[in-house]
Image (cartoon, coloured by chain):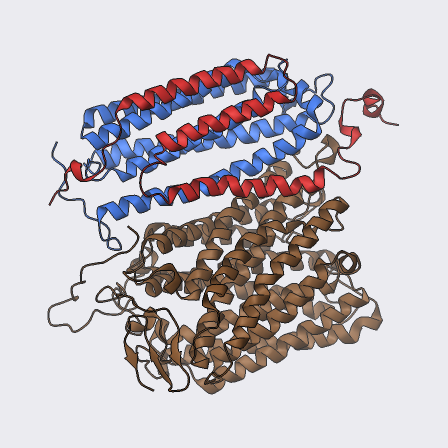
């Protein structure tokens, strides 16, 4: 007994995927560009934001997050949610710890002297 | 090619649809694990970069930007070819499916070749900790942390990509050869596609970590 | 769709009344080593974890022999390796896999009315990965063992330690993948393969507990995997991410380690809680009190366990602000656990209680878990922790939970489900004796350690001032009693395999779906797909009747 293809949801035509692919390449180029614009601390925020946008396109469209079963969404989001626990709660330590970061490892004043020892 | 009449669900499933949906969920559950695995690595990068911004900016100048950028384009394109292969499987176009899969395979291999060349270049630039490392002026002793992250992250990514290439080969040489991927049931190919695109996702995040630091 | 209606499995041969049991369906060694049957895989895991229980127990025996006198028995360096390997083996090779891979594997499909887990080959793969990691840890042990403590703190583990740290760390790394494979399987199975009518709020609490523990395993383990991988890289290569000479932060290693290892302790307790929630209703012959509260408590424990990890690092050098935040979160995580203790206690009220061995183990669990949990709250209090961190107070606290509670629940599960696993009944008198001896021996071993910790005895120390010997000697003496109590079941359970009375399908008159099939079950679990109409634990203590989850009533 065979099950015909009409029982299963047809995949979308290629066009949306090609459009999404082009969009991701454009976003990558934008991200690359921001590195040279002298945006200071905003640069990584924009760059990782672009990475998140590209990831959303990949997840939702290419990895078929929007198809059945809808439980996939819970899994897709969970990984990032759990990472937010790690990053967020760790900052309660790193934001406030005395003596962090140790200046010995930096290249600030006196670095050469520290390299050569007392 | 007619839809195969011999594919039946495994004993614990009632229908092929249930089996296919469950396979997808299984891969997504595995991706939770992978997200946290790479996310934990990027966490160490995150802590050190916010703690040593200047040192990382100096150390990262030696990252070979063109290799990273070309590889990004290659991987994004390979996700497209992979999804087109799955499309072809769903529409019952086995020849198109195999061609798109071969394209995906080729793109993955080119990524690894460029990566290999980049590693060679890194060795020349003396950014291989312990093996051949020279701290550049201004990177302090913390700059080496950037390069440890680089080698571990790109190494693990390359291993995952190699596994992906292996899975595509397995699909081509085993499952598709035996006629087990049909419009009626192509879940194994979808599952490989999900994994492949996730490997692409990791690179999307590693790219700004490694190649876009301290360029201005 | 998430439920399954399967067609009837044909009989093995024409004229046969029923299918042969899963134990006798096939006889070759290959049929065991390459099985896809979740029940056989459960027994394979059982063999592996029992082996490691005795290896870890042997290390503990040497430690307690050493600590019986201040003069000791072992060289200090050897003692360091003993406590390290004891911790590594007991945590990753016994406690974490214990209930999920044995009773979880065996009973989840049965309890939800499925024929197997979603991914049987992944299940078998998990056992092989576990054994691979076991081989690596045995290699580490035989070559002399690691000596860093099971917590592998850097830079001791990466730079200065002399033992076989790399092998031990890689063993833990590989072991993590076994956990991940198992948990992934359980999560997908429970979501997608429940029998018709088996809604989430009709699931037995053991299934909920395995689901909760699987969520924790899947999300916590990869962080440990990365952490041990980075440790191995640093040790092997010479430079890593935690090297203070390069601005690395040893506390970063600890943050990632405890991000896993605190949820890990909940991995060790959640399945045990599930077991107790099965046993108490059956032996009190009444429904559990507050079923939905119990399910929410399980999920709350699973999630909240991720918010408390730095309470292991209060004196490690984290900021005071972080200390306050994590102390507060630790107080919160105790609340759902307390709710469960209250509910188990109230579940005894107006019950028709019988003190068979599983019930004795379950009641042990409740008492010992309560004491362990309360001392955990004491440790969460910053002021107290500053004093008792790194002392035997902590050692006693976690052994009350991991040994007193979890191992008691493990033995309770073993006795409760023995008839279903083997088709035999165990001798009740011996079992009750072993349960009581366990409780006595356990308290004699570990209560003195609270006192020693309070007096200031540091942990991981091979010797101590002479005035503390009486407590140490008492603890070691208790350990010898505990050892007998743990060995006894080997004998009478082993005896029952050959000479025990044959068990019926439902010897304890319990309501779960696993009791609706024969003891032991046939290879494909059920002759026809069960259809569930009722919540679990429909026991009536007054009339001494019960109704199964399929709605079949039974008289007293």
Determine which quarter of the picture holds residue A63.
top left
Which image quarter holds the C terminus of chain C?
bottom left
Q: Position of residue B160 (x, y in %)?
A: 44, 33
At x 37% / y 23%, what residue is drawn?
A: B78
User: Is residue B55 positioned above or below C292 on the image?
Assistant: above
> Would residue C21 be found to the left or right of residue C259 on screen?
left
Q: Position of residue B73 (x, y in %)?
A: 43, 18
Residue C89 visible here: no
Chain drawn red in the picture: A
Nearest the viewer among C261 and A35 is A35
At x 31% / y 35%, what residue is drawn?
A: B190
Chain drawn brown in the picture: C
Q: Position of residue A106 (x, y in %)?
A: 76, 25
Determine which quarter of the picture holds residue C4.
bottom left
User: Is residue C254 positioned above or below C365 on the image?
Assistant: above
User: Is residue B29 positioned above or below B212 on the image?
Assistant: below
Q: Colour of chain B?
A: blue
């Amino acid at each position: 007994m065979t099950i015909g293809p009409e029982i299963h949801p047809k995949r979308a035509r290629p066009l949306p995927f090609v459009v999404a692919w082009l969009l991701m390449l454009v976003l990558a180029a934008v991200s690359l560009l921001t590195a040279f614009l002298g945006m200071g601390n905003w640069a990584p925020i924009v760059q990782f934001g672009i990475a998140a946008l590209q990831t959303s396109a990949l997840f939702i469209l290419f990895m078929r997050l929007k198809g059945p079963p809808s439980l996939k969404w819970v899994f897709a989001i969970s990984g990032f949610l759990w990472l937010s626990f790690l990053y967020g709660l760790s900052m309660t330590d790193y934001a406030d710890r005395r003596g962090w970061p140790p200046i010995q490892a930096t290249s600030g004043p006196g670095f050469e002297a520290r390299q050569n020892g007392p | 090619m007619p839809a195969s009449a011999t594919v039946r669900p495994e004993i614990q499933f009632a229908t092929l649809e249930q089996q296919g949906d469950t396979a997808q969920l299984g891969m997504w559950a595995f991706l939770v694990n992978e997200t946290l695995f790479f996310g934990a690595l990027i966490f160490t990068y995150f802590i050190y970069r916010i703690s040593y911004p200047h040192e990382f900016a100096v150390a990262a100048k030696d990252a070979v930007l063109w290799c990273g950028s070309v590889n990004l384009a290659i991987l994004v394109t390979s996700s497209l070819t992979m999804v087109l292969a799955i499309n072809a499987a769903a529409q019952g176009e086995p020849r198109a499916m195999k061609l798109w899969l071969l394209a995906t395979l080729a793109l993955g291999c080119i990524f690894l070749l460029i990566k290999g060349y980049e590693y060679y270049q890194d060795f020349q630039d003396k950014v291989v900790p312990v093996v051949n490392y020279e701290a550049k002026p201004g990177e302090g002793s913390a700059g080496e942390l950037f390069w440890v992250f680089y080698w571990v992250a790109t190494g693990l990514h390359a291993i995952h990509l190699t596994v992906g290439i292996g899975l595509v080969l397995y699909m081509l040489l085993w499952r598709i050869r035996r006629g087990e991927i049909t419009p009626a049931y192509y879940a194994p190919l979808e599952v490989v596609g999900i994994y492949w695109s996730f490997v692409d996702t990791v690179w999307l995040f590693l790219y700004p970590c490694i190649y876009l630091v301290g360029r201005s | 769709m998430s439920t399954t209606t399967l067609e009837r499995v044909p009989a093995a041969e024409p004229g046969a009344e029923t299918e042969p049991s899963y134990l006798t369906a096939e006889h070759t060694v290959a049929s065991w080593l390459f099985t896809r049957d979740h029940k056989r895989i459960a027994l394979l895991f059982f063999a592996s974890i029992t082996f490691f229980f005795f290896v870890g127990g042997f290390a503990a025996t040497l430690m307690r022999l050493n600590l019986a006198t201040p003069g000791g028995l072992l060289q200090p360096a050897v003692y360091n390796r003993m406590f390290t390997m004891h911790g590594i083996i007991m945590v990753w090779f016994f406690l974490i896999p214990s209930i999920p891979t044995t009773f979880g594997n065996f009973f989840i499909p049965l309890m939800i009315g499925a024929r197997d887990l979603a991914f049987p080959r992944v299940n078998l793969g998990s056992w092989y990965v576990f054994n691979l990691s076991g081989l690596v840890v045995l290699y580490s042990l035989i070559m002399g063992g690691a000596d860093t403590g099971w917590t592998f703190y850097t830079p001791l583990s990466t730079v200065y330690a002399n033992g076989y740290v790399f092998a031990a760390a890689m063993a833990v790394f590989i072991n993590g993948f076994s956990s991940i494979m198992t948990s992934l399987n359980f999560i997908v199975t429970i979501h997608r393969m429940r029998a018709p009518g088996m809604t989430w709020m009709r699931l037995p609490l053991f299934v909920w507990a395995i689901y909760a523990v699987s969520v924790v395993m899947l999300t916590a383990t990869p962080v440990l995997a990365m952490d041990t991988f980075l440790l191995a890289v640093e040790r092997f290569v010479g430079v890593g991410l935690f090297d203070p000479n390069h601005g690395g932060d040893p506390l970063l290693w600890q943050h990632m380690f405890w991000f896993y290892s605190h949820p890990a302790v909940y991995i060790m307790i959640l399945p045990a809680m599930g077991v107790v929630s099965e046993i108490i209703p059956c032996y009190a012959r009444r429904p559990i009190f507050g079923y939905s509260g119990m399910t929410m408590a399980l999920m709350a424990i699973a999630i909240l366990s991720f918010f408390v990890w730095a309470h292991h690092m209060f004196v490690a050098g984290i900021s005071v602000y972080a200390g306050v935040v994590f102390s507060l979160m630790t107080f919160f995580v105790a609340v759902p656990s307390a709710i469960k203790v209250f509910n188990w206690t109230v579940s005894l009220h107006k019950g028709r209680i019988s003190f068979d061995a599983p019930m004795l183990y379950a009641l042990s669990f409740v008492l010992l878990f309560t004491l362990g949990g309360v001392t955990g709250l004491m440790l969460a209090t910053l002021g107290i922790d500053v004093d008792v961190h790194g002392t035997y107070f902590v050692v006693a606290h976690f052994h009350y939970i991991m040994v007193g509670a979890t191992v008691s629940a493990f033995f309770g599960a073993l006795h409760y489900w023995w008839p279903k696993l083997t088709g035999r009944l165990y001798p009740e008198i011996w079992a009750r004796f072993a349960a009581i001896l366990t409780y006595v021996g356990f308290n004699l071993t570990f209560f003195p350690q609270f006192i020693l910790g309070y007096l200031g005895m540091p942990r991981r120390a091979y010797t101590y001032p002479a005035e503390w010997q009486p407590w140490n000697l008492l603890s070691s003496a208790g350990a010898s009693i505990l050892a007998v109590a743990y060995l006894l079941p080997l004998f009478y359970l082993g005896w029952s395999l050959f000479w025990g009375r044959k068990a019926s399908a439902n010897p304890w008159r319990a309501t779960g779906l696993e009791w609706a099939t024969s003891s032991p079950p046939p290879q494909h679990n059920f002759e026809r797909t069960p259809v569930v109409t009722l919540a679990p634990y429909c026991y009536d203590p007054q009339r001494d009747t019960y109704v199964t989850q399929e709605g079949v009533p039974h008289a007293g």
